Image: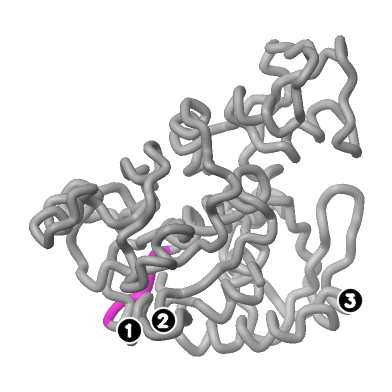
């Protein structure tokens, strides 16, 4: 099912009333939250807005269909609850001198919040000799596991990255390898201009996140016109022409998973988010009118 433009407008409106909405409709209840269904809501946009897979909301609420009614209270699992199974992987990490929570999370390819939850700790302080359980990540809804695994092997130039810019490819076909060839033909010696490419199910998987060499080698991007911006901006490209079609649910889920993880665990929290067209002097419609840019700004600004 495609999410219509009208629904996104509504999402944006709801999102822009942020605090009021959260105050009235979203009530913290233990570790999950409760959302009260509003007029015009659909499961898919509640899922998108909360950054959790639709299937996780259905599972948490024992729903067999997509049907919801106004006033209904839905439990919203956190995006990590949605992607995590039993906490018991059997792996124990004993904290050594110089270890940090972030470093340990990276080494084992899990998020900091998953690690904290698995060990029932609320602060970032850990002690030498402390034994930390490493949680298991279930791969079915987790589109990031290979991205984390590839990132573990590299030294992220954390302080270099000031911005994350989202693009569409403006063409329905392609994947990282196809764009790499095209960008080399255009004279880019580092090839693929983006750091990540999110597939649409045609030439790569729907929601598949391909990690480009500019990420694994921590090279500057080639995805915007401004050289200065390219130096410090991570480029994420969703395959598709979002002037003509919509990003798929799995693409948006992959995008939000990637963004959430980058901003919580990988790059500084202050890292700015922008659509390509938000950048001054770029003169582009990228990432297309059907990419939910306003909703993403509400989420990441
Ligand atoms: Zn662009």
Give the class, few, some or many, for how many residues have Cα within 10 Å of label 1's Cα (few <14, many ≥20): few
Q: Is residue 256 left or right of residue 16?
A: left
Looking at the rendered structure, the secondary structure element under dot 3 is: helix
Residue 221, compared with residue 137, is above or below; it is below
Q: Real-space Cα distance between discs 1 and 3?
A: 37 Å
Cβ of disc 1 within 8 Å of ligand 1?
A: yes
Determine the image quadrant of residue 202.
bottom left
Query: Is 169 in the magenta?
Result: no
Q: Are marks 2 and 1 in contact (CB under 8 Å)?
A: yes
Q: Is residue 83 above or below residue 88?
A: below
Q: Categorize mark 2 by other alpha carbons within 10 Å: few (<14), some (14-19), many (20+).
A: some
Disc 2 Cβ-to-ligand 1 distance below 8 Å: yes
> Between tags 3 and 2, which lies in front?
2
First in residue order: circle 3 vs circle 2: 3
Per the rendering, the mark at residue 277 is 2
Residue on which the image places disc 3: 23
Pick the residue in front: 162 or 244.
162
Frontmost residue, 71 versus 301: 301
Nearer the observer, 165 or 198 = 165
Q: Which numbered disc flags the more N-terminal residue, 1 or 3?
A: 3
Q: Is the residue at mark 3 in contact range of ligand 1, meaning its CB lies under 8 Å from it?
A: no
Q: How far, Cα to Cα, is label 2 from label 1?
A: 5 Å
Most common secondary structure along the magenta stretch: loop
Picture residue at 18% right of the left edge, 62% below the top: 173
Residue 140's tag is none
**135 up-or-down from 52: above or below:** above
Q: Position of residue 18 (x, y in %)?
A: 77, 79
Residue 239 appears in which quarter of the rendering?
A: bottom left
Name the residue beneath numbered marker 1: 284
Q: Tell me where residue 251 appears, x and y as whole percent.
A: 42, 59
What is the secondary structure assignment of the residue under circle 1?
Answer: loop
Read off the magenta span: 244-248
């Amino acid at each position: 099912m495609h999410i219509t433009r009208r629904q996104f407008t509504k999402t944006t409106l709801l999102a822009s009333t942020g605090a009021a909405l959260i105050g009235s409709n979203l009530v913290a209840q233990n570790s999950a939250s409760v959302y009260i269904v509003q007029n015009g809501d659909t499961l898919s946009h509640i899922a998108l807005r909360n950054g959790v897979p639709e299937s996780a909301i259905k599972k948490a609420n024992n729903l067999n269909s997509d049907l919801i009614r106004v006033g209904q209270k839905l439990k919203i699992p956190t995006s990590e609850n949605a992607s995590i199974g039993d906490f018991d992987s059997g792996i124990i990490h004993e904290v050594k001198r110089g270890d940090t929570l972030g470093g340990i999370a990276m080494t084992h390819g899990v998020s900091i919040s998953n690690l904290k939850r698995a060990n029932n700790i609320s602060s970032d302080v850990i002690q030498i000799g402390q034994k930390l359980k490493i949680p298991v990540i279930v791969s079915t809804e987790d589109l990031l596991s290979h991205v984390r695994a590839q990132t573990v092997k590299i030294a992220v130039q954390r302080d270099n990255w000031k911005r994350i810019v989202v693009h569409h490819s403006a063409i329905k076909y392609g994947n990282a390898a196809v764009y790499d060839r095209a960008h080399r033909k255009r004279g880019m010696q580092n090839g693929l201009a983006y750091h990540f490419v999110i597939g649409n199910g045609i030439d790569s998987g729907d929601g598949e996140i391909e990690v480009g060499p500019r990420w694994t080698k921590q090279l500057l991007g080639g995805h915007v016109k401004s050289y200065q911006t390219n130096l410090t901006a991570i480029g994420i490209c969703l395959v598709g022409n979002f002037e003509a079609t919509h990003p798929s649910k799995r693409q948006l889920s992959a995008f939000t998973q990637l963004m959430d993880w980058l901003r919580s665990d990988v790059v500084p929290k202050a890292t700015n988010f922008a659509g390509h067209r938000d950048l001054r002097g770029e003169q582009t419609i990228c990432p297309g009118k059907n990419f939910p840019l306003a909703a993403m700004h509400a989420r990441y600004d």
